[in-house]
């Protein structure tokens, strides 16, 4: 990380630790930081406008209307105590409203349902005056402010109680997948379960590194405002994604939001992408929150029935639903890379039918078997599936669109942890080289090796279970990993329980339900 970005992260994170004593979680702190940094950037933009005599050169982050002139950061910087808290609360409420023509913007997305979580006015002032006001956010390069924000998200993910871990995919893995996908300036790229926006930002960064110096202004503008979009179900996470993208110079504050806050699985896509990158949330079932007759919130399993899904038979399995949705998102020659857990490879019933459809009608050319220990969700064994759409409808008597499935085993013999032995770029170098070599764009020169094997689709389809749990050097070792020690199992269960409790607390807060205080027994 750039030393300047590291300095910024250390300063901001130090204050996060301080706020924990006031009951502010790392995720809540990150959210408040997003609000205040946005306001500071808006103020810096207006000060730059004052130095330009031509009004056509002026840019505005906050609404450019008479009633908004002088609002924002200037309202907060000189206040203390209750007046500061009241002004901040009012400002958040006003910013969450739609534009004058009732259109959603990145601004309204970031501040939608925004609330002040820092109830101690003295701490709020310290954050405003001593930390954020001391930095010049518009002057900072996007690789500094963007990298700093990404690092804060990563640190928040380590907070097991209420961090961003459930929305966080290891950046090393994301960047490797993006390199394998080779995005170009002319791709349209989406993530239907975008979390904090990691895949979208990595793809944008990769394109700018490879092509940025030679692109005309119209292509740069398209990359900034039209080429990328994501979907996120959780509003609080969507605002982090929107802020993350803005800090990486993707999108406009007063422009159309690049993150749709909705259930991606609920309806057929209204637009399609040439590249889909995704890590759908772990957890086997799709569910929604409903309120029963007594006013209590309950989780209800959802089986999506969509005319564009591969099968008429609906399923509540979240991963199979996302796999079908991603297939429908692709353009005729679109490409996808999606992270999915092991159960997608072998689960029977609907699972076998969906795997069959994938092999028959798409080109599932590559699978990366991932080791345990790289995700914040403990005990997860996952895989990256790389597949392409093939133009035209396939006739019943035509061969499968998948000829061979190449599988790379990164699991056998590898042990990773989040802190002591994290996944690093060099661990993925061999996979990138053998599976997506620089001079092998059509993947025709692949060669089998100890960890890299090819499986004919005819043989895979001949088995009625269409089992894709294949390619491991030592399957027995993988099974042994599942039989963890009592201590490891206890830790995994504790993580799941903490995560469930965090979801319950967030849901209760969203519904305005006060949970009993269990800290006193």
Image: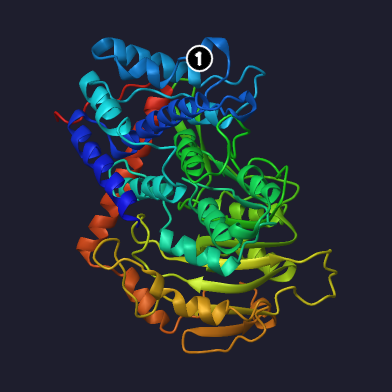
Viewer-side residue, 43 vs 470: 43
Viewer-side residue, 260 vs 108: 108
Query: Residue 306: horizontal and vertical position, in percent?
Result: 71, 46
Figure check: 173 above or below 377 = below
Snapshot quadrant of residue 213: bottom right
Farthest front residue? 53
Snapshot quadrant of residue 20: top left
Left or right: 229, with 44 as reference point: right
Snapshot quadrant of residue 371: bottom left
State how the image is colored: rainbow
Query: Residue 7: horizontal and vertical position, in percent?
Result: 27, 48
Query: Residue 57: horizontal and vertical position, in percent?
Result: 61, 30
Q: Quadrant of the N terminus?
A: bottom left
Q: Can the viewer see residue 47 in this picture?
A: yes
Which residue is labeled 1 in the image?
A: 69
Farthest left residue? 520
Viewer-side residue, 409 vs 324: 409
Mark 1 Cα shell of 10 Å, populated few (<14), some (14-19), many (≥20): few
Q: Can the viewer see residue 317 in this picture?
A: no
Query: Residue 500: horizontal and vertical position, in percent?
Result: 35, 42
Viewer-side residue, 232 vs 492: 232
């Amino acid at each position: 990380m750039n030393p300047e970005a590291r300095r910024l992260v250390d300063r901001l994170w130090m204050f996060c630790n301080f706020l924990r004593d006031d009951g502010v979680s790392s995720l809540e702190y990150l959210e408040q930081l997003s609000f205040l940094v946005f306001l500071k950037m808006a103020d810096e933009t207006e000060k730059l406008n004052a130095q330009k005599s031509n009004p056509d050169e002026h840019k505005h982050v906050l609404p450019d209307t008479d009633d908004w002139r002088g609002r924002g950061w200037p309202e907060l910087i000189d206040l203390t105590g209750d007046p500061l808290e009241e002004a901040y609360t009012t400002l958040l409420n006003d910013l969450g409203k739609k534009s004058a023509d009732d259109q959603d913007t990145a601004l309204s997305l970031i501040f939608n349902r925004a609330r002040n979580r820092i109830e101690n006015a003295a701490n709020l002032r310290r954050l405003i005056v001593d930390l954020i006001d001391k930095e010049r956010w518009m002057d900072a390069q996007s690789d500094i402010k963007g990298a700093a924000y990404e690092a804060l998200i990563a640190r928040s993910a380590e907070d097991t109680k209420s961090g961003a871990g459930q929305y966080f995919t290891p950046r090393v893995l994301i960047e490797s997948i993006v390199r394998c996908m080779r995005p170009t300036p002319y791709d349209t790229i989406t993530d239907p379960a975008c979390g904090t926006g990691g895949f979208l930002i990595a793809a944008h960064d990769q394109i700018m590194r490879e092509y940025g110096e030679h692109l005309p202004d119209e292509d740069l503008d398209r990359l900034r405002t039209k080429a990328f979009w994501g979907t996120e179900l959780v509003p609080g996470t969507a605002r982090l994604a929107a802020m993350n993208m803005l800090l990486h110079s993707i999108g406009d504050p007063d422009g159309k939001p690049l993150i749709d806050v909705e259930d991606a699985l609920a309806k057929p896509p209204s637009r399609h992408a040439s590249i889909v990158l995704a890590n759908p949330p772990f957890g086997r079932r799709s569910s929604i929150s409903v309120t029963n007759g007594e006013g209590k919130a309950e989780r209800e399993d959802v089986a999506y029935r969509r005319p564009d899904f591969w099968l008429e038979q609906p399923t509540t399995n979240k991963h199979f639903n996302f796999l079908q949705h991603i297939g429908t998102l692709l353009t005729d020659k679109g490409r996808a890379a999606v992270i999915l857990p092991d159960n997608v490879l072998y689960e029977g019933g609907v699972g076998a039918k969906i795997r069959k459809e994938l092999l028959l009608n798409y080109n599932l050319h590559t699978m990366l078997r991932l080791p345990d220990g790289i995700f914040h969700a403990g005990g997860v064994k996952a895989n990256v599936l790389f597949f392409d759409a093939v133009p035209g409808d396939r006739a019943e008597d035509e061969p499968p669109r998948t000829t061979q499935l190449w599988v790379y085993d990164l699991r056998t013999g590898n042990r990773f942890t989040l802190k002591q032995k994290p996944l690093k770029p060099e661990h993925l170098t061999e996979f990138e080289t053998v599976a997506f070599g620089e001079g092998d764009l059509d993947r025709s020169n692949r060669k089998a090796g100890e960890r890299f094997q090819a499986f004919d689709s005819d043989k895979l389809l001949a088995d009625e279970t269409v089992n894709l749990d294949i390619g491991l050097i030592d399957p027995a070792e993988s099974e042994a990993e599942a039989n963890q020690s009592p201590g490891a199992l206890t830790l995994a269960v504790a993580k799941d329980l903490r995560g469930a409790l965090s979801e319950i607390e967030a849901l209760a807060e969203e519904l305005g339900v006060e949970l009993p205080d269990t800290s006193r027994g």
